[in-house]
Amino acid sequence: MARYKIWDKKEKIYTPSSKVYTSEEWIAQFPWAGLPNAKVVISDGLINGGFCGELSQMQKMYAEQGVAFTDDMTDEEILTAIEEFQLHPPGYDQPTVEERTAAALEAQVLLSIPEEETSSTVTPMPMMAKTMALSSEEELESPGFYRVKQNYTRGLWNATLVNLAASKGQITQAEASKILNA
């Protein structure tokens, strides 16, 4: 269900405060809405008076924020582009400050493991402990595999840290290759 729609200037307006307006009352409340060239944007849904704006003003505001509009877009396509931008603003899929901090701390712990404590067996790293899972080939994955993989795929760790995790015994070399070549 869309967030917005163009008001037909006939439909009743139902507000969140339970007040119901006829089209005439709404236009009396917002005189600009009665202008013939005004494209009034309202909320889509039962409570359609939760938002009221003007399409060209919304388009201008969102264009300044980086939404790409074209001259051949319909009003509905413009509203869809605005909604998509609201739902997925630039950087929404980037790691949070908390994720970056956790990854940096995990890298610091990894770097602090003395070389003489490493062995050919996999030992769990305190910050990377995760329940071991069975893969489709019935192989056990290292306790740190998922954390290392997540840090790498989210761009929080580079290949050097993945290889270091393997050399320090937190993951196997095969798992490091799997992460780096995925």
Image (cartoon, grey):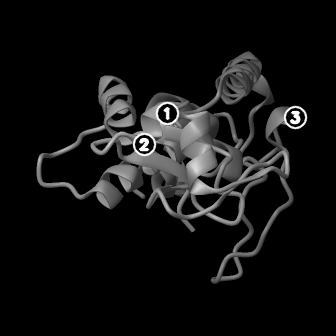
Mark 1 highlights which residue?
Answer: 31
Horizontally, is 75 left or right of 44 in the view?
Answer: left
Q: Quadrant of the N terminus?
A: bottom right
Measured in 3D between alpha carbons, the distance from the residue under mark 2 to the one under mark 3, in whole angstroms, is: 65 Å
Q: Toward the viewer: 6 or 85?
A: 6
**Residue for badge 3:** 126
Say which amino acid is labelled 3. Pro
* Any part of residue 91 in sight: no
Q: Mark 1: which amino acid?
A: Pro
Residue 169, picture quadrant:
top right
CA–CA distance between discs 1 and 3?
Answer: 64 Å
Q: Nearer the viewer, residue 172 or 56?
A: 56
Residue shown at 30%/45% (left/top)? 36
As helix, strand or loop, the secondary structure at mark 1 comes to helix
Quadrant (top left, top right, bottom left, bottom right) of the C terminus? bottom left
Q: Determine whether label 2 and label 3 are within 8 Å by CB.
A: no
Q: Residue 56: x percent and y percent?
A: 31, 36
The disc at residue 76 is: none
Asked if labels 3 and 1 touch by Cβ distance under 8 angstroms, the answer is: no
**Sooner in the amino-acid sequence: mark 2 or mark 3:** 2
Q: Position of residue 41 (x, y in %)?
A: 47, 48
**Rendered residue at 37%/26% (across/down):** 61
Kind of residue at badge 2: Gly
For marks 2 and 3, give the one nearer the viewer: 2
Q: Secondary structure at mark 2?
A: helix
Query: How far across and down, in percent of the image, does residue 168 sit?
Result: 67, 34
* The quarter of the displayed image where residue 147 is located: top right
Q: State which quadrant residue 114 falls in.
A: top right
> Can you identify the residue that label 2 sits on?
34
Mark 2 nearby-residue class (10 Å; few <14, some 14–19, many ≥20): some
Classify residue 46 as left or right of residue 17: left
Q: Nearer the viewer, residue 103 or 96?
A: 96
